[in-house]
Image: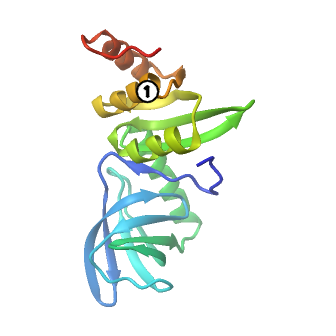
Amino acid sequence: MLEQRRHQRIRFSSPPRVYIGYGGAVDVGGIENLSLSGLMVRTSLGLEVGRTAGCEFSLFGSPLIDVPLTVVSRIGDVFGGRFQTGPINQIVIEDAIEAALALGHASILSVREVGGRKIMRITGGLNGSLRNDLMHALTRVGVDEMDLGSVTAVDQSGLALCLVATGHHEVAIGAQSQCFADAWKLAQALPGTVQPG
């Protein structure tokens, strides 16, 4: 899980809608995750690997993004696609991602090694959408510290994930944004809260 991707994968607190056009049919699907180069989409259309589909979406009020998508993978009704985009769409996608992260509607979880220690960094929203990635990092990769300095929103599920990391996996919390620090302080004050060791 140490981050080696060219473009980081963005997760969403609630999957944005995406319109997929393929073979004369149109379906409304959900974006499972997104990067600057492509997306994972859940759709009932029978997309074929190697073929091109139309893709149209907006991220939480962003301008409409209309881009062709080459299907590169399939697992059940979830398809991976690579954007066939030009410079203008690339800028619109990047701006939409940055705005969604700033509002806490989107999240990035990455792990990097610094001085022999594995640091998990969360950018954007700290919420339940990160559960699978966070648990994978804790149990398979191993994490020494969480960098939460770029968290822009946090909910109860996100706090619960931090309690698991600190209480059961002995992960230290490093840098903290103000919104996380305030929420964490309140969570620690609740009766019955497991205090990290």
Which residue corresponds to the image point at 57% horizontal and 34% vertical from the top-left?
143
Q: Amino acid at mark 1?
A: His
Which image quarter: residue 107? top left
Instruction: Looking at the picture, tell me which residue is in the foreground, 68 or 49.
Output: 49
* Colour mapping used in the image: rainbow
Q: Can you say whether 98 is above or below 150 in the image?
A: below
Which residue corresponds to the image point at 42% horizontal and 65% vertical from the top-left?
40
Q: Residues within 10 Å of mark 1 (few under 14, many from 20)?
A: few
Mark 1 highlights which residue? 168
Q: Residue furthest bottom?
A: 23
Instruction: Looking at the picture, tell me which residue is in the foreground, 103 or 64.
Output: 103
Q: Can you say whether 9 is above or below 122 in the image?
A: below
Residue 86 horizontal/vertical position (percent): 57, 70
Which image quarter: residue 153? top left
Q: Can you say whether 48 is above or below 98 in the image?
A: below
Q: Locate residue 182 relative to residue 3 in the image: left or right.
A: left
